[in-house]
Each structure stands twice: as C-alpha cells, then as structure tokens.
Image: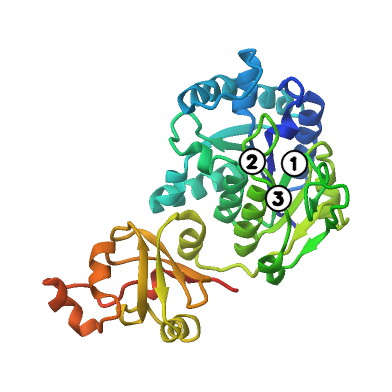
Amino acid sequence: MSKTIVVKIGTSSLTRLETGNLALSTIASLVETLTNLRQQGNRVILVSSGAVGVGCGRLCLTERPRNINIKQAIAAVGQGRLIRVYDDLFSNLGQPIAQILLTRRDLMDRNSYVNANNTFNALFELGVIPIVNENDTVATDELKFGDNDTLSALVASLVEADWLFLLTDVDKLYSADPRIVPSAVPIDLVNSDEFAQLEINVSEGGSGWGTGGMITKLRAAKIASSAGVTTVITNGKTPYNISKIIAGEAIGTKFTAQPKTENARKRWIANGLVSTGRIHLDDGAVNALCKQGKSLLAAGITTIEGNFSVSDAVDLINSQGEIIGKGIVNYSYDDLDLVKGQKSANISQILGYQTPETVIHRDNLVIFDN
C-alpha cells in the first residue's frame, strides 16, 4: 500500500563535522533510498537542512556566523549548491525533483497553507520528489523556526503523512547524550500517552554546523505524532534503514501516532498556527470544551496572557497549568481582559459595541488528547 513519507536530514548528517564539506556518500545513499521508495509507489518528501553549512564551506568559513544577515546571505550561497548536488544525484537515477522554500508565514496563512498542500499533491501526481527547506534568505525568524525538525513535522501534518523520519547523528533517542553520559539508556518506543512522562536530559545545541539538537526533534515528534504521523529518530549516516523500518524492523526510536483528525482546518489550527497568547480556564469551561464540545465563552476565563489580536491563535490552559487546546480568538487581548469572567449578555454593554457571543467558536477550536 502506498505511503506518504517525509524524511528530514540535518546538517550534521549531510556534512563532515571536521570541515563542513558535503558527505557525498551519505547523500548518495539517501538519494538512492528515496528514489527506491518513490519507485515503489510511495509519495516522498525530503526536508533538507544544510544551506548555511554548505555556504560556509563554499566561502571557506571555518565556523558558522552568528549575525543573522550574514547567515542569510550565506544560506543564499549554499542553497544553490545544495540543490544542484541533489539534482545531479537524483537525475542519475532518473528521478525528477522540485525545490520548495517555505517560511512559517506560508503555513500560518490559511490560503497559503491550502495552496502549499495542493502543490505537494500535484508534484506527487507528476512523480516528483519535493525537496523542502526554510526560505532562509527572507525569514527573519529563521533561527527560531528554522531548525527544520519543526518544519518537517509541519510539512508531515500538512500532507497527512504516514511516516516522518528525523535523520540525525545518533542512532536513536537516549535518556541523555551518550557522547557525554556513557550510562545513557536507549529508548526504542514512545507511545503517545507516554510523551508527557518522557524524562530525558537533552541539550539545546546540535553539532557545530547545525542549528538543531535532540530537543528540537522531540518537539517535532510531538507535533507530528499528534497529527497522526508515525515518527522515527534514526541515524542519518545509514539512510537505507528507512526502508527496513517501514518494513517493520526495530531501528531507531519510534513515536507512535495518535488517530488522525479528518478536519483539515483543525489540523491547520493545531499545527500551522503559532500561539501568541494563553487563556486560562476554570474547570467548568474545561468540561464544556472537552466533554461537551462547546465553544469558549468569556464567563469561563480566569486570566489571560500575551499580546494577541482578533483572529490570532491562543493556547487554552486548565487549572493545572496544562495546555488542553488551541483556537482562533474573536477578541483582542485588551477587550478580553475587560470581559473575562463576564456573562455573554453583559459584554456588549461593557465594551460599548456589539461583539461576538463566543470568545472562540468550536469550529475554530482544537482540543488536544492529553
């Protein structure tokens, strides 16, 4: 049966740590693996880091710069070189590719989100493997979003993928960095209900040439698995293991998928939008949302945080401080701060103009499985 497979490879796997030069043997093995998967009838997307690392190598820089403008300029140098290498290798196997550069804004805007999905589906129909990267040269928040682990998870959610593979420089997830803590315990399987209890010691930093680290992969795994995508962390130096894992071999760390939602708009709200605030709810409101499927009213709101406007996304927090959902809000922070805890019938009088009855309508609301 045909599967939709997203594979993310990081800079640490694409390049040699000592020099930053491309690890061509690894890339060739990856290209062969993805081409074989495509020829078997699967829909395949590659999310590739490496533009900045390749740009550094092309410009003979010995370390990754910290200045964002320089970094974006270097990404422009490296992106052309990187896609040329991919095109040469894939062309040798007769496999067409396409380059797609995305920013977080492309996934936050509903029309752009839908258009991106349509483009991916059209490329699948044409037998093309899309190669995705952050549009580093224009994304001003590139380094906060641009770990590409998060990008790959959002792309996997967008296309309703069956699998997401996060290829990195270790063979699986450990209880701590095995390069630093020799006694670290390997973790083979994480069920969806075990994610919140997962206790590991990870650092923010990745390799000297990359921007990610294990913590970004855990965030990505959580996004993807909550969107119904089975996620695997495994070693990028052995990309041929992807086919073995799909066939059932226990390689790497597998995160089981939660049931997929059929509502595309709610997938977009849950995974495409960035929350700009937090709304804290009393127990009655939580029960109305989670058990009764109702919209959020002002009466159930205790406190609010952030600087949000009308139509922004906000997180919903229960009395234990847990995020229980996300939604698109009908009020700005300033207005909601005036009417929180009030009955709907009193709101228009307090604000002095006619207002929506609901703070978040149930059609614009996603409740998470905790």
- Label 1: how many residues lie within 10 Å, few (<14), some (14-19) or many (20+)? many
What is the C-alpha distance between the residues marked 3 and 2?
A: 11 Å
Q: Earlier in the sequence, mark 1 or mark 2?
A: 1
Q: Which residue is drawn at 87% across and 47% down?
A: 182
- Label 3: how many residues lie within 10 Å, few (<14), some (14-19) or many (20+)? some
Q: Position of residue 34 (x, y in %)?
A: 75, 40
Name the residue that disc number 3 marks: 202
Q: Position of residue 142 (x, y in %)?
A: 50, 37
Q: Which of marks 3 and 2 is in front?
A: 3
Name the residue that disc number 1 marks: 168
- The answer to which image quadrant residue 213 occupies is top right
- The answer to which image quadrant residue 210 occupies is top right
Q: Nearer the viewer, mark 1 or mark 2?
A: 2
- Label 2: how many residues lie within 10 Å, few (<14), some (14-19) or many (20+)? many
| For residue 313, above or below residue 73 | below
- SS label for mark 1: strand
* Residue type at numbered disc 2: Gly
Name the residue that disc number 2 marks: 212
Q: Which residue is drawn at 49% across and 26% down?
A: 67
- SS label for mark 2: loop
Q: Which of marks 3 and 2 is nearer the N terminus?
A: 3
Q: Is residue 344 left or right of residue 282?
A: left
* Residue type at numbered disc 3: Val
Q: Can residue 332 be seen in this view?
A: no
* Residue type at numbered disc 1: Thr
